[in-house]
């Protein structure tokens, strides 16, 4: 039976804003938001570890920037960390003192997410959110370049309070970011700048991950490369509406290794919360 985590509108905090400002660690390196979230989680759970030691424990993969297009795209799909890497990193860095468990939120689940998170926080459990910040409303032109992992230090009716950077995300936005399919958008400039004449794009359809074929990444790249002039050189002069969508692609979509959701982390010597987290049922798909 699901544990009732509290009434709607419930709030919970590990840190106040001044405490978060003073204690949080910000991005420690390229693609290292996952490792940074682990460091902040260890701080909340009062496990003192050297940052370099934690970074080593978390399997952060870097983007391969100075490579041909196909290799670049493959590297982008796995750059950074997944929730599995975060859980393994917490286990290693804490010397086995922390138990962590990931809860999928895509497809959407039947849960009052703010109250659910606040309830766990009030039990001494630390959430790490895996957010697809690219999951923006249709027509939005300001699209971030990547997914993001952030430690949640508090939840109120105002929103979800997170570190790296310190931000209060509105509940609707937060829910939107953590209920995304595993898709990564790659900017046009990052595709065009790595294209070389004669490059074999068919390797994009030969990846072991069937998502590359299902999304027809090879076809997306070819369409982008075939865009008629002058729109590729002068985007501001391109037509608007459906014609623009047909003529001009601002991004391509590729499979992402990440899955949106929340990793809940607890000290094993917090025996009551540890037991509850082990026994908590999976969230039911809506």
Image: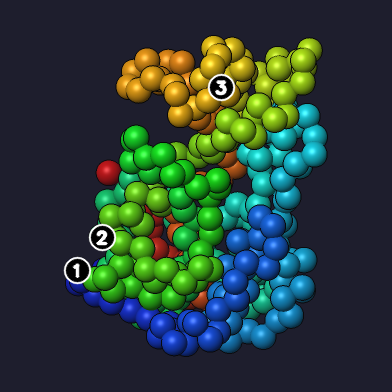
Picture layout, residue 151 above or below residue 123 = above
- Residue 248 position, x and y percent, is 48, 21
Q: Which residue is mark 3?
A: 232
Classify mark 1: helix, strand or loop.
loop
Mark 2 to mark 3: distance in Å?
A: 45 Å
Q: Earlier in the sequence, mark 1 or mark 3?
A: 1
How far from the left and from the top, in percent, is residue 225? 61, 17
User: Is the residue 256 above or below the residue 119 in the image?
Assistant: above
Q: Residue at x 38, y 43 (%)?
A: 136
Q: What is the x, y in percent for residue 165? A: 51, 68
Alpha carbon separation for disc pair 2 and 1 = 7 Å
* Residue picked out by circle 1: 8
Residue 192 visible from this viewpoint: yes
Q: Marks 1 and 3, Cα distance to the nearest angstrom? A: 49 Å
Specify the color scheme. Answer: rainbow
When asked about the image quadrant of residue 53, the answer is bottom right
Q: Which comes sooner in the sequence, label 2 or label 3?
A: 2
Picture quadrant where residue 120 is located? bottom left
The residue carrying mark 2 is: 112
Residue 227 bears which disc, if any?
A: none
Residue at x 28%, y 74% (from the top left corner): 156
In this picture, residue 160 sits left or right of residue 267: left
Q: Are discs 2 and 1 less than 8 Å apart at CB?
A: yes
Can residue 92 be seen at all in this image of the molecule?
no
Q: Nearer the viewer, residue 276 or 117?
A: 117
Residue at horizontal 53 percent and vertical 50 percent from the top? 147
**Does residue 87 sit above or below 265 in this rendering?**
above
In the rendered image, the vertical position of residue 46 relative to residue 193, given as above or below = below
Q: Secondary structure at mark 2?
A: loop
Nearer the observer: mark 2 or 3; the answer is 3
């Amino acid at each position: 039976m699901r544990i009732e985590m509290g009434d709607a509108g419930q709030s919970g905090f590990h840190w106040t804003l001044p405490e978060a400002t003073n204690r949080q660690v910000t991005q420690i390196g390229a693609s290292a938001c996952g490792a940074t979230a682990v460091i902040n989680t260890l701080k909340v759970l009062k496990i003192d570890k050297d940052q370099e030691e934690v970074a080593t424990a978390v399997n952060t993969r870097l983007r391969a920037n100075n490579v041909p297009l196909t290799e670049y795209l493959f590297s982008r799909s796995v750059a950074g960390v997944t929730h599995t890497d975060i859980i393994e990193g917490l286990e290693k860095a804490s010397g086995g003192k922390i138990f962590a468990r990931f809860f999928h939120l895509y497809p959407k689940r039947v849960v009052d997410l703010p109250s659910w998170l606040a309830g766990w926080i009030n039990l001494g459990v630390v959430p790490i959110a895996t957010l697809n910040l690219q999951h923006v409303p249709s027509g939005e032109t300001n699209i971030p370049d990547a997914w993001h992992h952030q430690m949640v230090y508090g939840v109120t009716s105002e929103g979800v309070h997170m570190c790296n950077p310190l931000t209060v995300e509105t509940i609707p936005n937060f829910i939107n970011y953590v209920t995304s399919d595993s898709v990564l958008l790659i900017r046009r400039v990052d595709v065009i700048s790595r294209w070389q004449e004669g490059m074999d794009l068919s390797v994009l359809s030969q990846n072991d991950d069937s998502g590359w074929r299902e999304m027809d990444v090879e076809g997306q790249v070819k369409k982008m490369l075939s865009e008629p002039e002058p729109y590729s050189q002068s985007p501001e002069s391109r037509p608007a509406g459906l014609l623009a969508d047909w003529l001009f692609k601002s991004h391509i979509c590729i499979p992402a290794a990440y899955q949106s959701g929340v990793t809940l982390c607890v000290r094993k010597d917090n025996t009551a919360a540890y037991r509850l987290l082990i026994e908590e049922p999976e969230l039911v798909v809506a």
